[in-house]
Structure formats: structure tokens, C-alpha cells
Amino acid sequence: MKNRSEKLLVRFTHKEKEHLKKQSEIVGYKMEPFVRALIAGSNLQPKPPIGKAELLAEINYIGHNINQVVTSTHIAKSVNPEAINELVELLNEVYDKVKGL
């Protein structure tokens, strides 16, 4: 941890402080690190919505399944209608999950 020995007193109105607090919560920071990031010129983005990590993991899993179906179809050198149906179902799952955000 950096040795932060310098202090700066800044006074805010209640409304200004609440706005600062709300903005820091949007990006997922506490107020002091948020202010430091602003001063440093960081490009702050809103934190991902709850469940985004789980969704990305699920999409990754579905992507692996799609890759396996495509690989087996390529090896067999023929298109299996069941494999195509499975691909369509997997892609529909991805669409439904992303649409649900």
C-alpha cells in the first residue's frame, strides 16, 4: 500500500457529497479511491451488472460446446441434423441470456 501522508480537506454541500457518493458507487469504488482515480485521469466505467461474470462463464461454456459440435461435424465430413439443432439451441440460450440483461 502506498504511503499516503498528505491530507486535503475539501468541503461539500450535502447534495454534492451525495452526488460524489452515488458516482463512486456506480463504478464500484469507495469515495476516496474514486476521487484519486478522477484526479489521475482514469477512464472510469460503470461496474458490470450483477451476474455478468456468471453470464460470461455460461457463454464460454456454451461456446466450448458449439466448438465440439463443429469439430465433430468437420471430422465426420458430413452435417448431422442433430448437431445443427444442438447448435441452434445453444445459440438460442446465448441470445436468451444476453437479452435478459
Image (cartoon, grey):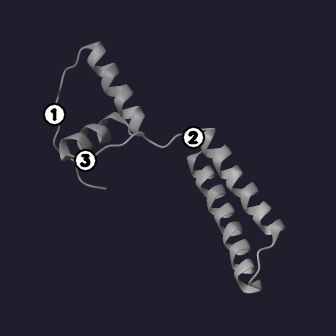
Query: Mark 1 highlights which residue?
Result: 8
Query: Mark 2 highlights which residue?
Result: 50
Distance from the alpha carbon under mark 3 to that under mark 1: 20 Å
- Residue 61 % position (x, y): 67, 63
Give the mark, 2 or 3, whose residue is nearer the N terminus.
Answer: 3
Distance from the alpha carbon under mark 2 to that under mark 1: 34 Å
* Closest to the observer, 62 or 7: 62
Residue 59 in which image quadrant: bottom right
User: Farthest residue in the right direction?
Assistant: 82
* Closest to the observer, 92 or 55: 92
Q: Residue at x 57, y 51 (%)?
A: 53
User: Farthest residue in the top direction?
Assistant: 14
Quarter of the rendering occupied by the C terminus: top right
Query: Mark 3 highlights which residue?
Result: 42
Q: Are marks 2 and 3 in contact (CB under 8 Å)?
A: no
Q: Is residue 57 above or below residue 80?
A: above
Q: Is residue 14 above or below residue 47?
A: above
The amino acid type of the residue labelled 3 equals Ser
Residue 12 in which image quadrant: top left
- Residue 21 % position (x, y): 36, 27
Q: Is residue 19 above or below residue 63?
A: above
Quarter of the rendering occupied by the N terminus: bottom left
Q: Is residue 30 above or below residue 58?
A: above
17 left or right, relative to 27: left
Looking at the rendered structure, the number of numbered marks drawn on it comes to: 3
Q: Residue at x 32, y 43 (%)?
A: 44
Give the mark, 2 or 1, whose residue is nearer the N terminus.
Answer: 1
The amino acid type of the residue labelled 1 equals Leu
- Callout 2: SS: loop
